[in-house]
Amino acid sequence: MTTLLDEMKALIALKGPITVERYMELSLAHPEFGYYMNRDPFGATGDFTTSPEISQMFGELIGLWAAEVWSSMGAPNPVRLVELGPGRGTLMSDALRAARIVPEFRAALDVWLMETSPTLAAMQHELLLDAGVAVAWAQSLKEVPEGPAIVIGNEFLDALPVRQFVRVNGQWRERMVRLNDEDGLAFDVASAPEIYIRANAREGEVLEVNPAGHRFMFELGGRLVKQGGVALLIDYGHAVTGLGDTLQALRAHRYVDPLAMPGECDLTAHVDFAAMARSAAATGAAVYGPIDQGDFLRAIGIDLRTKALAERAGPDRAEELHQARNRLVGKGKGEMGALFKAIALANRRLPTPPGFHPVAARPA
Ligand code: SAH
């Protein structure tokens, strides 16, 4: 049976080393063998667990957040509710259920799921069949019809391919993937230096750039500025741009060598929120955050919701709810409250999105 590893080895043998960016892109999105293309990677039996899969509260709170945003936008009808990389569709399903308490919002919704994987799109379709709201699929933001939009995305940006540069002999060289002597893959650096990168760094340091992330932030910010709307992006990453290799591969909830099994493990890189914010702000959109996921969820009411659900549940279920809340909000080891961050983009005419702090006025 051919695997992605075989395909990549053939490609490299033919054309020479490929960039880390290309390696990541092929690993995740190769039409036949890409990681997301033909599997359900989530949950206990999969490779990793995301916030909406940990607790229904995550999607419910985001659904209520969206309803409040919609009302602050002047309650446009229709409004495009767009989710980026919806995985199993759990977040959207929980969000739409919670939004039942705002029937006018539900009635105005035109839901779009931006998904590249046919397998996951089919799962989303199945889960949302009886959501009572029209749902359509798109491969890119351009396909979503014009008009005011509320855009949400959890763990979307971390799946976009990054370029890496390594400091070698006082110069930056792009990190590449080549064949090694044992018929496997190994990291290497390009022979020519990248003379346009000015950052200084110690020998061996790695600098990451996410070109697809930047392109996406330009597109998203531009759309919100022109057509109105608000976006919420949650991901794991750092608030301040820094150096370091954050490429990581997860298989069955364990870290594995990112080159060992392309297409068979989840491959991600931490999101550089400061860099993403710079691109978004360049479009004229207002950018809020990043703030810690824990602070965001508390600000939009996770404590009250945990309490309300726990009061109606039996003791085991109540304990489960408290544990899920702690995992999403806590800032200790193994908890997601500080590791994950939230950022919002909005049209400047709109008020600060719920859960975020107002930002200082942009200098003229
Ligand atoms: N938001 C979900 C899933 C996160 S995993 C959750 O929190 O559980 C990443 C998701 O993004 C998957 O659904 C994957 O198929 C999708 N994806 C990855 N790259 C994409 C791209 N370029 N465009 C659209 N979707 C993408």
Image (tube, helix red, strand yellow):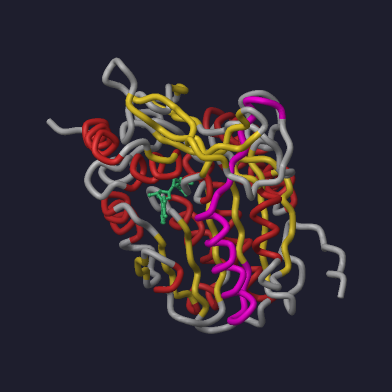
Find out whether residue 207 is within the magenta segment.
yes
Q: Quadrant of the C terminus?
A: bottom right
Position above or below: 215 against 34:
below
Q: Position of residue 112 (x, y in %)?
A: 42, 68
Compared across the picture, whether 363 is left or right of 331 comes to right
Number of labels in the image equals: 0
Q: Position of residue 68 (x, y in %)?
A: 66, 68
Comparing 247 with 308, the one in front is: 247
Find out whether residue 104 is within the magenta segment.
no
Q: Residue furthest top?
A: 182
Q: Position of residue 42 (x, y in %)?
A: 39, 37
Compared across the picture, whether 299 is left or right of 109 comes to right
Q: Quadrant of the N terminus?
A: top left
Q: Position of residue 14 (x, y in %)?
A: 24, 38
Q: Which residues are magenta?
A: 202-230
Q: Residue at x 36, y 37 (%)?
A: 41
Q: Residue at x 71, y 46 (%)?
A: 198
Compared across the picture, whether 28 is left or right of 200 comes to left
Q: Residue at x 30, y 43 (%)?
A: 34
Comparing 157 with 210, the one in front is: 210
Comparing 164 with 258, the one in front is: 164
Compared across the picture, whether 167 is left or right of 348 comes to left
Q: Residue at x 59, y 66 (%)?
A: 218
Q: Residue furthest left?
A: 1
